Image: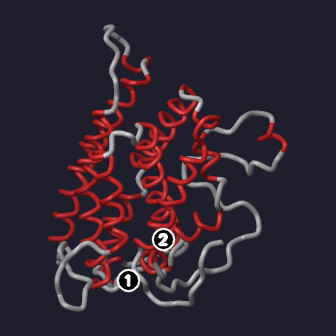
């Protein structure tokens, strides 16, 4: 499938900036070679250009500058709502894959399986709050959450949204897809989301003063959405996902046994995420 044209500045020659919450050095540095990398760090170092394209899109730059038209934002939010709704079944399918121990464990934090269940339960609660936040903020800023992108005026999932929905639903229909695969999907999507909106917020902090109400969208993004999507709570959540994902990967010896599978998952998410952002014009540039 052809990708829409996007405008990207040339990425730096050195290893890409790490995602928020991931304080690590490039794998090529001797200090990093002294100890094995975790699964999530291996994936983060796998494809810098693809990661760059997925998290530093022109759409995000306009969002951070307050220059994104309200109609463009409404169309994207409508797709993001569909993504969030499909996330509910996905999380439920992952919870169903956790085989809790028969023995009574008083300290649940000492059990990886209980930590995973608690994290996924929090994710389920978070997405319910997020959907309500969408509804409340959209009402405040007069944004319709079923705004069509199609020329015929019919509201439906866009191709990238449909790919995410299909990926999430696969965990409910395909028992061969493992819990660790699901955690990698969860970590990958949330890491991209946090990094993308953190990059967008850098355009807000670069300006010493800005007036969100004068923004093209009336202030919805810079007053409400971006602070929510870059909050310390969300950053901690993403870090917690990475922690349980790496712990489960270590327990299953995943790097030695199935690394290619998890690399493929990561690359698929990066490809879909790049196309999930709306085309706002610019030259065409694709990842290697």
Q: Which of disc 1 and disc 2 is earlier in sequence?
A: 1
Kindly identify which residue carries mark 1: 68
**Mark 2 neighbour class, 10 Å CA radius: few under 14, some 14 to 19, many 20 or more:** many
- Residue ID at (26%, 43%): 124
> Do the CB atoms of the residues marked 2 and 1 lie less than 8 Å apart?
no
Picture quadrant of residue 174: top left
Q: Residue 53: horizontal and vertical position, in percent?
A: 56, 71
* Crowd band around label 1 with a 10 angstrom C-alpha radius: few (<14), some (14–19), many (20+): many
In the rendered image, the residue lying farthest to the top is 103
Q: Is residue 156 above or below residue 194?
A: below
Determine the residue positioned at 25% across, 41% down: 92
State which mark lies toward you, 2 or 1.
2
Q: Is residue 151 above or below residue 101?
A: below
**95 on left or right of 156:** right
Could you tell me how many numbered marks the image carries?
A: 2
Alpha carbons under labels 2 and 1: distance apart: 18 Å
Q: Position of residue 156 (x, y in %)?
A: 21, 75
Question: Element under label 2?
Answer: helix
Task: Give how far across and how far down residue 195 sits, in percent.
Answer: 51, 60
Quarter placement of the C terminus: bottom right
- The relative height of residue 272 versus residue 260 in the rendered view (above or below) is below
Name the residue at 19% across, 70% down: 138
Name the residue nearer the viewer: 278 or 220: 278
The disc at residue 274 is 2
Tag on residue 98? none
Q: Is residue 48 left or right of residue 209?
A: right
Q: Nearer the viewer, residue 209 or 100?
A: 100
Q: Residue at x 39, y 40 (%)?
A: 176
Secondary structure of the residue carrying tag 1 is: loop
Q: Is residue 101 left or right of residue 152?
A: right
């Amino acid at each position: 499938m052809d990708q829409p044209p996007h405008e990207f500045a040339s990425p730096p020659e050195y290893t890409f900036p790490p995602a928020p919450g991931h304080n690590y050095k490039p794998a090529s540095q001797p200090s990093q070679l002294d100890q094995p990398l975790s699964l999530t760090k291996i994936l983060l170092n796998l494809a810098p250009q693809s990661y760059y394209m997925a998290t530093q899109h022109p759409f995000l730059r306009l969002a951070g500058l307050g220059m994104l038209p309200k109609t463009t934002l409404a169309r994207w939010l409508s797709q993001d709502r569909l993504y969030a709704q499909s996330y509910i079944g996905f999380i439920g399918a992952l919870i169903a894959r956790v085989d809790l121990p028969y023995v009574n464990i008083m300290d649940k934090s000492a059990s990886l399986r209980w930590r995973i269940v608690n994290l996924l339960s929090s994710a389920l609660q978070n997405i319910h709050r997020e959907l309500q936040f969408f509804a409340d903020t959209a009402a405040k800023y007069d944004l319709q959450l079923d705004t069509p992108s199609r020329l015929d005026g019919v509201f439906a999932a866009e191709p990238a949204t449909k790919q995410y929905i299909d990926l999430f639903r696969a965990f409910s229909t395909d028992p061969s897809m493992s819990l660790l695969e699901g955690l990698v999907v969860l970590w990958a999507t949330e890491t991209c989301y946090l990094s993308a909106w953190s990059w967008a917020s850098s355009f807000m902090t670069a300006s010493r003063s800005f007036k969100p109400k004068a923004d093209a969208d009336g202030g919805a993004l810079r007053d409400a959405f971006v602070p929510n999507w870059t909050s310390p709570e969300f950053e901690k959540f993403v870090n917690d996902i990475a922690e349980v994902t790496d712990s489960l990967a270590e327990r299953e010896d995943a790097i030695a046994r199935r690394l290619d599978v998890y690399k493929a998952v990561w690359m698929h998410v990066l490809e879909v995420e790049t196309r999930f952002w709306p085309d706002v014009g610019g030259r065409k540039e694709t990842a290697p």
